[in-house]
Image (tube, grey):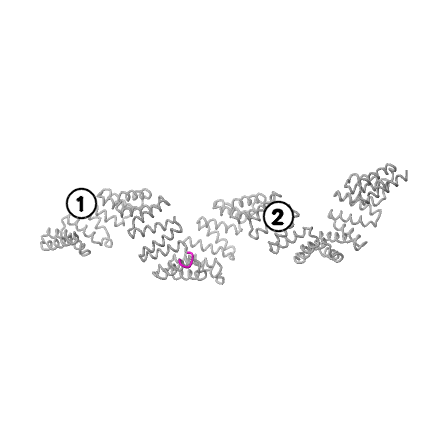
């Protein structure tokens, strides 16, 4: 029986050495059947089950073996290993400790107990076990390295560094030692040494991807974002779902301005961890930078769900609303931020910008002034304060503030806001008609930036206002010939040509504007005006009709169109258009006067009177309407009323031949022949060829029995009429 037992054990051990564990188990089971009270059979079969990872059966056999021989230290060590594999670290430590009680020289037990203790974060105790192993065998690099790890986890960098230095001295190809020493240098922010060790680790073992992660993080801190992305990408090949790497990759893309790639990275993070609030925040910022403000708003609001009242997030939400032109919501957000933190400068800046967009310059001014008073170093707020004063027409105050800003930056002439401040100060001087000062500012901007066309245009404008038309044209011609002129350039030049009465050239410039922008209503309207001046009424009418297609209820356009139809004697259409003007704007006095004149020409005197009366009621200083009303009364033979109107006119207006002629007729009809003669004489003095004035003065002389004078005037009348024929 004993021989059979030994034979089976011997055969089993042979199979065991050949890793044929199932066969070994068969022989061991039969051996146990022969001798169920020998611990050795259970121990060996337990080892076989261990290698097959059938831990429950292995534990059963080890415990049965211990029941038969409780002082077998090896079995306790095997049990400890199985418990370790099952992550039952406390049980593993117990078994290894029992082994060491029985055999205090079992270095494997010390080492494995050290591993279990380190996993349990009992680093100091683990260090004792690893130290025993290393002292017992100073070639035990595993013990040395694991002790180094424990020191590392305890942040005892000096001892940790000492252990890994020794490990590397003993084995220069230990990639893990280089890796772990790299982590120490990383923690100590010794980036150069860390990078060297991680790179060496990768040279020794290209299958170890963890160094890529740390290299990437160092590259992030060094702002070498392309390198960071490369290393994160390598790490993610092995660990594609590592959230931290995905998130940091997104940040690196964002820093490089590759916002679409950043969005993809952050989206992957959110897919893996839907409650990762920072991923929502940063994806929101990336969406903002791509102009996708709706998606940005959604992500930022989602981040706010995790961190309510987060000021940075609220500020960005406000910016989204501002970009979406949802100004009311933007103001609501910024008001909330200032309540949460009354000193939050960005909220005041952004709220000021919102008010600025709404052209609410008073409220914008309040916010920008608050910012500048809070932090005078924020000269952006000083600039904005100056701009608000400019738009509020506080030109003197805006000039003072622009000057202050300019003085702060006069050594940095290429700073765009410095040039903008000069330009805007120039505009303020221009509105105050301080043209010399404005010219200085615009000229300096134009010198600093010859491509700043608006400065050139403003220089030309001032030259025009100073009647220096040649210089104004030189500047504008240079812009047209050598730069990329905007419609504004052509328009400004057209104004100069118009002032010089060069209407054809002005029309050419306006036509160029319309080639660029066919629906430019200002250019169409102005060109129509010039066509009218050139008596090209059909062309004027064509332009004005285009204007009406763009703005059907523009009273000024309708009025101009009516004037042109009146000029080509289309009285019916002119009347319709004047009536439409009155319907759209009953307070438009000039329209009543113009319509009254058409009625007067059509001999519809009562309608003419109604229109003139209305025009005069709206503006008693409308002397043309008063004169024409007098003329209407004259035609209606209401000479007293006609005289009343004529005599009410001021002398600087009533100083033309027709006026004196009509006034003379009224006195003649009232039988005041002497005064009639005096008045007709004034008409003749103003126009010596005024034949009718001679005729009626002759008749007045005849009534006064001044036959000689009458005869001479009739002769002059007949001669003038003969010349006309």
The image shows residue 58 at horizontal and vertical percentages of: 80, 40
Q: Is residue 440 magenta?
A: no
**Residue 181 image-quadrant placement:** bottom right
What secondary structure is found at the residue carrying circle 2?
A: helix
> Is residue 674 toward the left or the right of residue 429 in the image?
left
Spatial CA span between label 1 and label 2 = 98 Å
519 vs 193, nearest the viewer:
519
Task: Choose between 344 and 529: the one closer to the eye.
Answer: 529
- Number of other residues with Cα within 10 Å of mark 1, as a class: few under 14, some 14 to 19, many 20 or more: few
Q: Residue at x 23, y 53 (%)?
A: 654
Quarter occupied by the N terminus: top right
Q: Is residue 117 left or right of residue 447?
A: right
> Does dot 1 land on a helix, a strand or a loop?
loop
Query: 10 Å neighbourhood of mark 2: few (<14), some, or many (≥20)?
Result: many
Give the numbered dot on residue 246: 2
* Residue 268 image label: none
Task: Check residue 637 in the rendering and tell me which mark sits there, or answer none.
Answer: 1
């Amino acid at each position: 029986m004993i021989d059979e037992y030994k034979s089976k054990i011997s055969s089993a051990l042979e199979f065991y050495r050949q890793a044929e564990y199932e066969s070994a188990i068969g022989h061991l089971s039969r051996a146990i059947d022969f001798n169920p009270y020998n611990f050795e059979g259970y121990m060996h079969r337990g080892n076989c089950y261990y290698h097959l990872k059938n831990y429950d059966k292995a534990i059963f056999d080890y415990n049965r073996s211990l029941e038969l021989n409780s002082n077998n230290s090896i079995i306790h060590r095997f049990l400890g290993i199985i418990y370790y594999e099952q992550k039952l670290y406390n049980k593993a430590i117990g078994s290894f400790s029992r082994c060491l009680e029985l055999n205090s020289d079992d270095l494997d037990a010390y080492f494995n107990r050290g591993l279990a203790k380190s996993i349990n974060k009992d680093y100091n105790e683990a260090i004792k076990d690893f130290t025993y192993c290393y002292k017992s065998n100073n070639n035990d690099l595993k013990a040395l390295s694991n002790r180094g790890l424990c020191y590392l986890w305890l942040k005892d960098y000096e001892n940790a560094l000492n252990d890994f230095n020794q490990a590397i001295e003993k084995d220069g190809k230990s990639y893990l030692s280089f890796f772990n020493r790299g982590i120490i240098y990383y923690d100590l922010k010794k980036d150069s040494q860390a990078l060297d060790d991680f790179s060496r680790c990768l040279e020794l073992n290209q299958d170890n991807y963890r160094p890529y992660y740390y290299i990437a993080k160092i590259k992030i801190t060094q702002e070498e974002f392309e390198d960071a992305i490369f290393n994160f990408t390598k790490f993610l090949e092995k660990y594609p779902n590592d959230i931290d790497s995905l998130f940091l990759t997104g940040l690196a893309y964002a820093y490089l301005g590759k916002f679409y790639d950043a969005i993809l990275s952050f989206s992957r993070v959110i897919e893996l961890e839907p409650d990762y609030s920072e991923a929502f925040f940063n994806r929101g910022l990336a969406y903002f930078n791509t102009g996708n403000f709706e998606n940005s708003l959604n992500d930022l609001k989602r981040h706010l769900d995790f961190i309510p009242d987060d000021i940075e997030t609220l500020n960005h939400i406000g910016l989204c609303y501002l970009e979406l032109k949802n100004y009311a919501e933007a103001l609501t957000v910024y008001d909330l931020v200032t309540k949460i933190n009354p000193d939050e400068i960005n909220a005041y800046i952004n709220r000021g910008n919102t008010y600025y967009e709404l052209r609410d310059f008073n409220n914008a001014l309040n916010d920008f002034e608050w910012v500048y008073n809070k932090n005078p170093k924020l000269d952006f707020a000083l600039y904005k304060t100056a701009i608000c004063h400019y738009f509020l027409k506080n030109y003197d105050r805006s000039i003072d503030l622009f000057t202050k800003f300019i003085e702060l930056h006069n050594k940095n002439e290429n700073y765009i806001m410095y040039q903008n401040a000069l330009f805007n100060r120039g505009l303020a001087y221009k509105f105050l008609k301080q043209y010399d000062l404005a010219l200085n500012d615009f000229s300096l901007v134009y010198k600093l930036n010859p491509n700043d066309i608006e400065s050139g245009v403003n220089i030309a404008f001032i030259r025009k206002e100073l009647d220096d038309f040649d210089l104004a044209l030189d500047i504008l011609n240079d812009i047209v010939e050598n730069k990329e002129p905007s419609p504004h350039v052509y328009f400004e030049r057209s104004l100069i040509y118009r002032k010089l009465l060069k209407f054809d050239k002005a029309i050419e410039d306006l036509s160029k504007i319309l080639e660029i922008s066919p629906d430019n209503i200002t250019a169409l309207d102005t060109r129509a005006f010039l066509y009218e001046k050139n008596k090209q009424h059909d062309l004027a009418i064509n332009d004005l009709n285009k204007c009406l297609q763009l703005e059907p209820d523009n009273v000024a356009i309708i009025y101009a169109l009516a004037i042109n139809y009146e000029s080509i004697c289309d009285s019916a259409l002119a009347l319709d258009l004047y009536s439409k003007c009155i319907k759209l704007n009953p307070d438009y006095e000039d329209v009543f006067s113009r319509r009254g004149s058409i009625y007067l020409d059509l001999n519809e005197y009562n309608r003419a009177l109604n229109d003139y009366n209305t025009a005069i009621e709206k503006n008693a200083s409308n002397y043309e309407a008063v004169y024409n009303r007098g003329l209407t009364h004259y035609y209606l033979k209401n000479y007293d009323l006609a005289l009343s109107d004529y005599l009410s006119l001021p002398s600087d207006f009533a100083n033309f031949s027709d006026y004196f002629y009509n006034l003379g007729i009224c006195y003649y009809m009232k039988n005041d022949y002497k005064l009639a003669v005096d008045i007709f004489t004034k008409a003749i003095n103003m126009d010596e060829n005024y034949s009718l004035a001679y005729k009626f003065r002759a008749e007045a002389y005849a009534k006064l029995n001044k036959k000689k004078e009458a005869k001479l005037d009739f002769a002059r009348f007949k001669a003038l009429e003969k010349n006309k024929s």
